[in-house]
Amino acid sequence: MNKVSVKTPIVEIDGDAMTRVMWQMVKDQLLLPYLNMSLVYYDLQLKKRDETNDKITLEAAEAIKKYGVGVKCATITPNKDRVKEYNLKQEWSSPNGTIRASLDGTVFRAPILVSNVFPAVRTWKKPIHIGRHAYGDVYKNCEYRVPEGGKAEMVFTSNAGKELWRGTIQDFKGPGIIQGIHNIDKSIASFAKACFTYAYDQRINLWFGAKDTISKTYDAQFKKIFEQEFETNWKSKFKEAGLEYFFTLIDDAVARIMKTKGGLLWACKNYDGDVMSDMLGSAYGSLAMMTSVLVSPQGYYEFEASHGTVQKHYYKYLKGEKTSSNSMALIFAWTGCLRKRGEIDKTPDVVEFAKNLEVAALETVESGIMTGDLMLVATPDAKNKQVSTEEFIAEVAKRLQKKLE
Ligand code: NAP
Ligand code: MG
């Protein structure tokens, strides 16, 4: 069989734990036998980030800017326990946070739908896509543990050295905590533009929720910028296409989402998108049934799985126990990346390969062969069979092989 050639190198970012194990299996069995591709490899496993003082994370982000398209495995964001477990120099920040801050942009997530898994919410008939702003807020915060009574203030000094503003956060009577977060008009504007563009391309309505009644400056600025973008660039286009832009309070959006039919893009601020995409992923069947892509305003793309490193399964794997972890989101990260690469390079055979791999993966689940997470939620059927992490990938490989013959 002739291998399909990928014209431009792909930036490959490896990760941690169970996803690292699955990553290698997916590459070995579903990609490398069929593709001639050059991979620009960055190993972001925790140990390597520690060794390089996290420089490797920044280098990976730079590589995506150079080549345009990358694919990333899940990585551990260390906490105090991990610092001990991995004997780290420090509690390194989230690699996703670092890469997103460097590329800016919006993370779009959509459920991977199969005919034998119904969403937990009965009214959802179509996918609910999430557009998560990937810059700033709590992910690029400045925070402090207040040790004793005292005054916490927020000060803004202009580049000209003039103090333009000062406000009291709190007069502390005893210990507590403070946090400063920020965002940038330019980043919010590109978030808004990316969301309108995505919704229009997919011909779905756009919802945006924020808490501007409480946060009358910060969240209100998001609302204002979205409105400006809509009024200036999309109002007539949306009207012609029969589409709606709908702003509402974030809590109202959450309540309404539970009653929609789906088929919409839900634009979320960074934290809302982090939390709500996990809720959606799990409600559509499993965290592993969700695609995720970071789209930067300059047109760089980073594809990833939206779930974490599946730590619990990894500890079982290390003990030699059988695992049943789902590699769908990792497979779709690779196919998303290959499809985009093929579109940019104008190599239809690469796009075609990505499609074949996706169909092979979907058909495997629809034929009843699935991992434990899906067994719990799939429509009961005598043909359903729970398989191990390895067996699932081998089953996809079998179907892929047939399609390519
Ligand atoms: P997680 O890895 O997403 O796993 C949470 C639970 O969801 C798992 O224990 C498992 O449930 C289920 N699950 C997730 N992915 C699955 C899959 N592919 N197949 C089957 N079940 C799956 O979240 P976490 O345990 O909170 O985080 C672990 C590590 O991942 C942390 O160090 C965190 O920092 C990191 N993380 C990384 C990313 C990223 O790089 N994109 C995102 C989130 C978290 P059961 O145990 O019930 O089977
Ligand atoms: Mg999350």
Image (cartoon, helix red, strand yellow):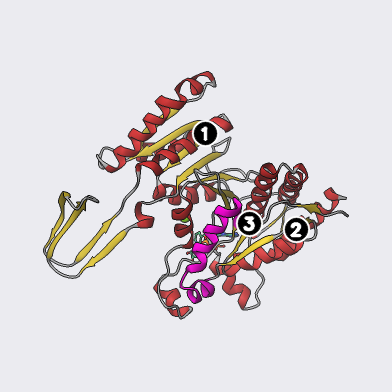
Mark toward the viewer: 3 or 1: 1
Residue 260 to residue 298: above or below? above
- Residue 318 lies, in percent from the top left, at 61, 77
Q: Residues within 10 Å of mark 2 (few under 14, many from 20)?
A: many
- What's the distance in space between the residues labelled 3 and 1, CA to CA? 25 Å
Q: State which tag comes first along the sequence, 3 or 2.
A: 2
User: Residue 197: which disc?
Assistant: 1
User: Residue 87: which disc?
Assistant: none
User: Residue 330: which disc?
Assistant: 3
- Residue 69 lies, in percent from the top left, at 61, 51
**Element type where label 1 sits in the image:** helix
Residue 251 to residue 235: above or below? below
Question: What span is colored magenta in the figure?
Answer: 46-71
Q: Residues within 10 Å of mark 1 (few under 14, many from 20)?
A: some
Q: Is residue 358 found left or right of 195 in the rendered image?
A: right
Q: Circle 2 sits on which residue?
A: 30
